[in-house]
Structure formats: C-alpha cells, structure tokens
Amino acid sequence: MQYTPSRLVLRLLSIACVLVPLAPAARAQVLADEYLKSEVMIPMRDGVELFTQIYEPLDAGGEQLPILMKRTPYGIGFYGEEVRRPVLGPSAVFNPSKYIYVHQDVRGKFRSQGEFEVMKPVYSQLVGPDETDEATDTYDTIEWLLENVPDHNGRVGQWGISYPGWQTAMGMIDAHPAMKASSPQASPSDMFIGDDFHHNGAFRLMYTFSWLSSYAAVREGQSENENRQFDYGTTNGYDFFLDLGPIVNVNRRYFHERVPTWNEYMEHGSYDAYWKSHNLLPHMRDITPTVLNVAGWFDAEDFYGPMSIYYEIERNDPANKSVLVVGPWSHGGWAGSAGTSLGDIPFDQPTGQFYREEIEFPFFEGVLKGDGTHDLPEALVFETGANEWRRFDHWPPTDARPASLYLRADGGLAFDGPSGDAVAGAFDEFTSDPAHPVPFSATPGTHQGHVWMVEDQRFASERDDVLVYQTPPLEEDVVVAGPLIANLFVSTTGTDADWIVKLVDVFPGDSPASVQPVGEGERGFEMLVGGEVMRGKFRESSEQPRPFVPGEVTQVRFDLRDKFHRFRKGHRIMVQIQSSWFPVIDRNPQSFVDIYHAEAEAFQIAQHRVHRAPEAASRIEVQLLPASSGGK
C-alpha cells in the first residue's frame, strides 16, 4: 500500500526524535523514489561516533524488514541526504526487493570519528586499555539500529568485498545475536602468510606500495577526497621499482614518515607477534551467522583469505551452514561485470550475472526474509577449462585422489616418478640476477591489475632464468581439484632465495581465436592457471628464518593454493620455476639479511639448482578428479 501524508509525517517525526540528540546537523528527507534516506552519527561504546546512511522503504507493504549493512574504509560516498545511492544493496538485483539498507564509514575514515588502523587486531589481542575493534563497532552499530530504526524484523545481514569483506568477517566474531547472514567476499585473513601484503613471507612490493600510499597516509582532516593516488611519474612500474633499489629507500625517497603503517611493516620482517595479532583465523570459531564465502580463482590480492576462512569455519563449526562460492574472477570481479571472460580467456557464460542473480540474492532473501535457510550447496565452484559450474557437498571433492607431477629430464613433466635407473644427482640450473629480475607481466604498469593472473606466459618461458617443464599433449582430460603443493628439492650458491612455481595450461594451435599462437608453427598460448612464491628463509618456519647452506640440497615445500581446472585433451600441462616475480614481489638479495633494511651491497647473483633425481624428486602434488565427476 502507499504511505498516506499523515503516516509519512509521523514517520519523519519519529526519525527526527531519534536523530536530533545524536546528530543535530542530520536531516531526514523523502527521496523522489521509494526510500527515505537519513544520515546519522552512531555512538560506539567508547564515545566515538560513526557516520552512517540509512535507507528505509516508504512502503514496506506492512512487513517488518531485515537490515542489510555494509561497512567500508573507502568512503560510502553519496554524502548529503539529497544525494541518492543508485544501488542500495550488494547489486542492482536487490533494488526491487525491500530491505533497510545501511552504509557506514568505519572508524577514522571520511566522516566518521576516531583513528583508523589498518587491519586493526581483535581487541583481545591488543596490549593496553583499547577495547574496541571492528567486531565491537559492528556489534554496537547493530544494537543502535535495532533500538532506533523501527519496522525491522530483528534480522541483520552484512556483506563486503576485499577490505569491507574483512570488516564483514570481523563482524562474525562474537556476533550480535541479530546477525543472521554474513557474506565476506575476497576477505583477507593473514597478511603475512597469504594475503595482500605478503605471500609465504615474501613482500608484495607493488601492491603494498600502492595501497598504503593511497589509503594509509596520515589523515589530513575529514575529506571526501582523502584517498589519493601516488604519482609515479612514469607508466612503467618495472623500471620505477628497479630504479628504487632496496625497499629501505621507499620511506627515504617517497613516504617521508607520512605512511606509518609502512614503517610498522618494515619493523616486522618475520611472523612475529605483530603479524599474529592481525591473523583473523584463530577467531573463526563459534560463528553463528550463516556464511556465504566468496572467492575468485584469479584473485591477485585475496584468494588465500576466503579459502582459509572457509576451511577454518568448517574445521571449528561444521554445523554452520556455510557456503563456498569460487568463480573465474579477478578480485571482486563478480560484483559488477558480466564475467564472460578475463583477459584473453573466455568463460562462455555470464558468470558474474549468474552469481548475483542465482547465488547472492537468493542467499540473503532466504536467510533474512524466509525461514532462515538457503538452498545452495556446500560448494558451488566454477571449473575453469571446462567453463561449467559444479556443485559439491564438500570441498575439496571427496572423490579427488592425490597424484604428483614430477619434473623430468629435458624439460619433461609426468605423473610417473623418476625410474630406478634415473641419473643420481640430476638437476637443472639457472642464474638469478637481482639486477635483472623476471617480470610478472609482459606489459607491467605501475599497478598490478588483474589480467596477469591468466596472462600468456611465453614471455617468461623464453628466459634463461626460468625453468620450464611440460607434458606431451594430453591423451585425455585431466582435472585438478583442490590444493596444489610444490615439493621442491633445491640448492643455491647464496644463503637465501625466492622460489616461484607456476602451473600453466598450454593451448594447442586450434584453440579459440583469443588464445591462438602468435604465428605459424609457434607453440600455443600458455595460460597461467596458478602460481605462488616462497621466501626460502621461511621454508621451515615463518617465525624463525633460516639461511640456506650454499650447495646443500634442501627441501622447500609450499602451498600453491586451491585450483579447479580442466586441462583438455590435446593441451599440455606446464610448470615454470623461477626466483623473481618483479615487482609484484620485492627482490630477494639472495643473501641472508633483513631484507626490509638491506642496502644495495647485500644483493648478489646466485646459481640455483632444482633437483629431480630419485633421492630428490621435485614435483607438484595435486588432487585429480575423475573427468565425469561433479554435477552442474
């Protein structure tokens, strides 16, 4: 039914009575469409007030409605009660549906009060009297909303992507009883082990430099334009960061003490108490909201995070009706695009649209409006290579079986290990020069972007400092599903080294036009399926780095993260191994030093060997799924 003028006046008066004591400058205004927008300052338990926008339907049809909330450090925008947000919920699919939508600037950002701290630890991990964190701020916000916004049904949902995804995961810790549905999407979990700023202890230079310079610089008052992009003075990121020299020069040349979080990171070069306090995973227990956990197979920033959050909830709270969704997306690529392709790789269907219409919207509708349940499977994952969605009641699939891809002589790769008569002590060798690191992309800009996660790797396999191993053309499809583990036996003339392992799908010449070979007779497109880095000194412990003994054969085993990919008949499976991935990863001096404070003289050329003899059989451990397994 339509609101009558008298009811509308009463509704405005009720809001005004609530808002005036808390935000004298706030005004309630009827929008030209179907929602009433109000802007308020919501007090937290320590007195800090957070700027919040609330959208309430003018005509709820007599129903009590759930609250759907997003909290972000990036600025909620659309400031001013006369300015309307075109999309109120996670996507435009939600627009016809009625919710009470809430958007909030987190503590210390934009129009909210307080001090912003990057990935502030759970307060129980803090030293001193500080007893607030993003979990308590979420709780206090919900409490205020329930008490001051009428006509709700007592159910709250939260969603967010990337940092707002982390805000959502934090809201799941000691969650407010009204929090019924949480969707952390591409949320980081551990910034030293696998997310934005480090991978296995290796520093993600390009991304960290960009993000901290833009979003963590010293705040200059409250400004709607406080996020500023760094001016590199060039479009060539490879040259910019190579000219930088050791990363100790970042603060000297560019930041000049104005990015305190950068300086904090530089004082914590191993997995010490600082990084442990920022680890979200120990708090992923007793999770009461129903969880929709979303990840992208080709997410360059936060893939470890959502996968580890899912695994941790499953381990600690198996009764939680959590859902894992993984699609063929870059970071947040499911939110706005059709999702029909990424770079040169087609997916043959609008995967993003499918997610928004058939996964995300039904999830919130069922949990927040229906009987509190959903009809989604435990895992809904996209099989790249086959370009099909698959449904599983467990991830990894229970019928996946372990196997290994062994490095063989003459650049071979096979599921059979070295035979008994293989040459003892066999190895392949390359020279790693920090002055000429392997680029992460053929066209590196100043920002890493997304397409490099599926980029043609021929630019790398042509280099002398990249080892290449590949199978013959496959006689049948091969499907990998689940974790990939690099199990290398290596030696070096230095005392430290990075080890980068990439899994590659080599296309034949009759492939789709986007991945055709560049010329007659040349090998096909080499699609990057997945890759990861291990900083060698952390091979045994992320807490206690240990140098290599020059010339000594040493095992380096690390997780390449989950994949679900079909290598088609006629394709080849390729593995590439290198020791630099620049400037996505900072350069390893190849000497055992504190890299964050190392000077130029610490950097040295080293000879690296990857061993493949029977007694030291380097390999990639995989999970193989029968080609016919999995429902659509």
Image (cartoon, rainbow, N blue to C red):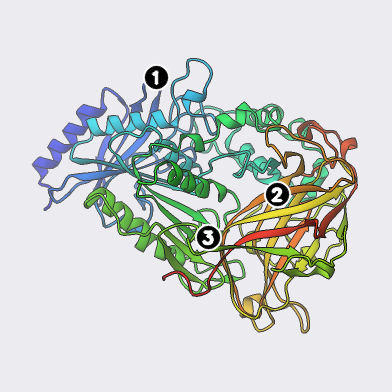
Q: Disc 2 to disc 3, how far (Cα)?
A: 27 Å
Looking at the rendered structure, the kind of residue marked 3 is: Trp
Circles 3 and 1: CB atoms closer than 8 Å: no
Snapshot quadrant of residue 232: top right
Earlier-in-chain disc, 1 versus 2: 1
Circles 2 and 3: CB atoms closer than 8 Å: no
Q: Which residue is mark 2?
A: 557
Query: Considering the image in quadrants, where does the C terminus appear?
Result: bottom left
Q: Which residue is mark 3?
A: 329
Looking at the rendered structure, the kind of residue marked 1 is: Asp
Residue 306 screen position, x and y as percent: 50, 48
Mark seen at residue 46? 1
Looking at the rendered structure, the kind of residue marked 2 is: Arg
Mark seen at residue 296? none
Residue 442 screen position, x and y as percent: 74, 62
Residue 451 screen position, x and y as percent: 62, 61
Earlier-in-chain disc, 2 versus 3: 3
Q: Is residue 44 above or below residue 321?
A: above
The one of 141 and 239 positioned closer to us in this rendering:
141
